[in-house]
Amino acid sequence: MVRAINAVRAQHGLSAMGRSGSLTGSAERYSRWLMANNTFRHLSSIQASSRFSLLGEALEWHSGRRFDVRGTLNRWMASPGHRAIVLSSVMRLQGAGVTRGRMGSRRATVWVLHVGRIHPPGAQLTSLPLP
């Protein structure tokens, strides 16, 4: 997923987002939590390293057990809010998690994308709006 997102970003003239172990871990944990709790929703905060001053999240689920990276990314790009996260010029790092299992009685695959920006120590933190 990280490579696919960076390919789409390159098509739009944007630099690649680096892969973050912290964001990958938080996305993987959250995708497992969503599946285990048979729910699909955003929480009020993303559980990632406190070094991040800005964080964003995109969720997607589809029926079946295929990872369907291309389909997932296409659906995010067709949604204005998710598209803004994928094409953000503010966020610098990303991590993705995926879990396959059951949502209710259906076989399902859940994707979580976490994106973030770390500010250097001592920098004044400001609120930066997403596009």
Image (cartoon, helix red, strand yellow):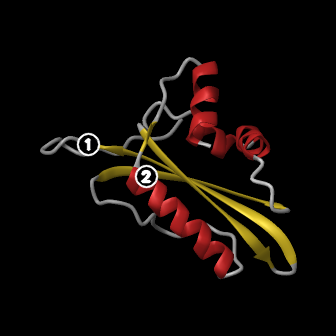
Residue, x 45% and y 63% (percent of image)? 46
- Where does the N terminus fall, quadrant-wise? top right
* Residue 22 figure quarter: bottom left
How far, Cα to Cα, is label 1 from label 2? Answer: 12 Å
- Residue under pointer 1: 119
14 lies left or right of 73: left
Residue type at mark 2? Leu
Picture coordinates of residue 75, whole percent (x, y): 77, 44
Q: Which of the numbered marks, if any, corresponds to residue 50?
A: none
For the residue labelled by badge 1, is the local secondary structure a helix, a strand or a loop? loop
21 lies left or right of 118: right
- Residue under pointer 2: 55
Residue type at mark 1? His
Q: In the rendered image of this protein, does residue 126 appear above or below residue 103?
A: above
Would you say the residues marked 1 and 2 are in contact, meaning their CB atoms lie under 8 Å apart? Answer: no
For the residue labelled by badge 2, is the local secondary structure a helix, a strand or a loop? strand
Residue, x 75% and y 53% (percent of image)? 67
Residue, x 56% and y 40% (percent of image)? 2
Foreground: 64 or 130? 64
Residue, x 27% and y 54% (percent of image)? 51
- Where does the C terminus fall, quadrant-wise? top right
* Residue 81 figure quarter: top right
